[in-house]
């Protein structure tokens, strides 16, 4: 089994994903790896938490979990965020989001 990418860490009950958010993009997509974070572009602007909510919806849909299973653990007001996804296995998240 290969080691997990630097942007993904297994925690009890799920995974933590380090994300570099790029708001106001032309479309929602996983852009690749940026340093030790997974770069994700969303169409929402970074105003009043819209980009954060959009990111949670995007990840929930991609990972196949309810939005309530995802939470922003750190970086709510920063571009780099740590998202915790409950009920998601590391190998599944890597296969789905891997860039």
Image (spheres, helix red, strand yellow):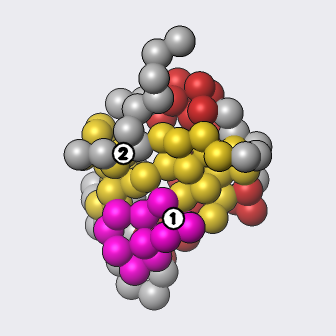
**Residue at screen point 40% across, 54% down:** 19
Direction from residue 39 to residue 17 in the image, left or right: right
Count of picture labels: 2
Q: Distance between the residues labelled 2 and 1?
A: 16 Å
Residue 27 in percent (x, y) is at 35, 51
Can you name the residue that lies furthest to the bottom here? 48
**Residue at screen point 73% across, 56% down:** 69
Residue 54 in percent (x, y) is at 51, 65
Q: Mark 2 points at which residue?
A: 38
Residue 29 in percent (x, y) is at 38, 45
**Residue at screen point 35% across, 74% down:** 78
Discs 2/1, front: 2
Residue 11 within the magenta-colored segment of the rendering: no
The answer, for residue 43, to whether it is visible in the render is no
Above or below, comparing residue 32 to residue 19 in the picture? above
Is the C terminus in the top left, top right, bottom left or bottom right quadrant?
top left
Question: Quick one: 35 or 57, which is closer to the camera?
Answer: 35
Residue 33 in percent (x, y) is at 28, 40
Direction from residue 90 to residue 45 in the image, left or right: left
| Mark 2, other Cα within 10 Å: few <14 / some 14–19 / many ≥20 | many
Q: Look at the numbered disc 1 and give the secondary structure of its residue.
A: helix
Question: Quick one: 9 or 62, which is closer to the camera?
Answer: 9
**Residue at screen point 66% across, 58% down:** 70
- On residue 54, which mark appears? 1
Q: Give the range drawn in magenta.
A: 72-82
Residue 78 within the magenta-colored segment of the rendering: yes
Q: Look at the numbered disc 2 and give the secondary structure of its residue.
A: strand
């Amino acid at each position: 089994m290969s080691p997990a990418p630097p942007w993904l860490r297994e925690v009890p009950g799920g995974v933590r994903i380090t994300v570099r958010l790029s708001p106001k993009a032309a479309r929602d997509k996983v852009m690749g790896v940026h340093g030790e974070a997974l770069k994700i572009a969303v169409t929402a602007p970074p105003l009043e938490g819209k980009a954060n909510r959009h990111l949670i919806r995007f990840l929930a849909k991609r990972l196949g979990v309810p939005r309530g299973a995802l939470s922003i653990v750190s970086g709510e007001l920063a571009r780099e965020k740590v998202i915790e996804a409950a009920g998601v296995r590391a190998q599944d998240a890597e296969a789905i989001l891997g860039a």
